[in-house]
Amino acid sequence: MTKLRIAVQKSGRLQEKTVALLKECGLSFNNGPNRLKADAHNFPAEILYLRDDDIPQYVQDGVADIGILGENVLIEKKKNISLVERLDFAKCRLSIAVAKSIEYGSSEFLRGKKIATSYTVIVQQFLDERGIEAEIHEISGSVEIAPGIGLADAICDIVSTGSTLLGNGLKEVETVIKSEAVLVSAESLSPEKQEILDRLIFRIKSVKTAKNSKYLLLNAPNESIEAITEVMPGMKSPTVTPLKEEGWSSLHSVVNEDDFWNKIDQLKALGAQGILVVPIEKMIL
Ligand code: PRT
Ligand code: ZN
């Protein structure tokens, strides 16, 4: 039987959410720190546990068919693989930072300076686009201490909350790229594998859409039903059922998480009462 080989991070920041996503997509498999691979029991797939940095090469070489990794690593490794789907987690940015006391001005500051980073390809590209020559110093870990020990004038590293930079007396001065977890695939898959991948992508989209949506139930006076429908149109249109109390109805609908609180304010202003918000597990479109 053909199986889709899925490369995921063995341990680290992506691991837990990657495994959770695949499980929400209905794949059942064993995972644990000492495993190298696992078979999905109920889906034609095999999970390979790897270091995130190795995933692009493995996918390019066809050892794995698809993989889940940070977009920052995908861009840095420059392999012939395709980004298939953004996954909405592990959001971060790759930024340039300098000591707090420095007056940075613009990227011109970097001319002739030393920049410490693990992302040499991305930093070089950033400099080339601006016609700036600078020395890139490759280090693999604890990049944020480089300016403090006199190793570099600036760093380029991943930032999420910014507290690591702050704790090391640095300030963020440029966002080089934004990143999130992404699903990548080999450039060409056999028709059998492509069909399995399409099924998986369909499931991932259903999980993603559900996460961004809420099921809303509320009571409203009948004269507000039209106006409320404008605010929460739902997948087709809201379900409206009469309440026992004369002149009132219950409305049910799906709303997008974006702008959620604004919608609640509008609904309240239109006379909605007893608003219930319920999470949705899957949404099949
Ligand atoms: O062992 P392996 O090679 O597989 O893992 P790794 O150590 O290379 O990567 P890991 O697990 O640390 O991160 C995996 C991916 O998570 C990264 O490639 C990013 O795509 C994503 N990600 C999201 C992050 C962060 N957020 C993050 N905050 N990766 C690293 N950080 C680090 C950053 O390097 C810095 O040290 O967290 C610190 C900054 O965080 P804040 O919150 O203080 O700004
Ligand atoms: Zn890594």
Image (cartoon, helix red, strand yellow):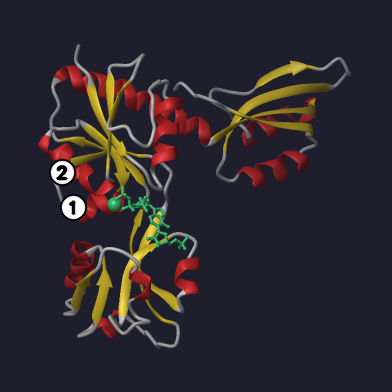
Disc 2 to disc 1: CB gap under 8 Å: yes
- x, y (%) of residue 35? 32, 32
How many dots with numbers? 2
Examine the image and state in which quarter residue 178 appears. Answer: bottom left
Q: Is residue 274 above or below residue 101?
A: above
**Label 2 vs 1, first from the N-terminus:** 2
Q: Amino acid type of disc 2?
A: Gln
Query: Between residues 140 and 126, which one lies in front from this camera angle?
Result: 140
Q: Residue at x 20, y 21 (%)?
A: 193
- Quadrant hosting ligand 1: bottom left
Q: Which mark is residue 57?
A: 2
Looking at the image, which is closer to me, 142 or 156?
A: 142
Q: Which mark is residue 77?
A: 1
Residue at x-position 23% and y-position 23%: 4
- Percent from the top left, x then y, of residue 37? 28, 29
Measured in 3D between alpha carbons, the distance from the residue under mark 2 to the one under mark 1, in whole angstroms, is 8 Å
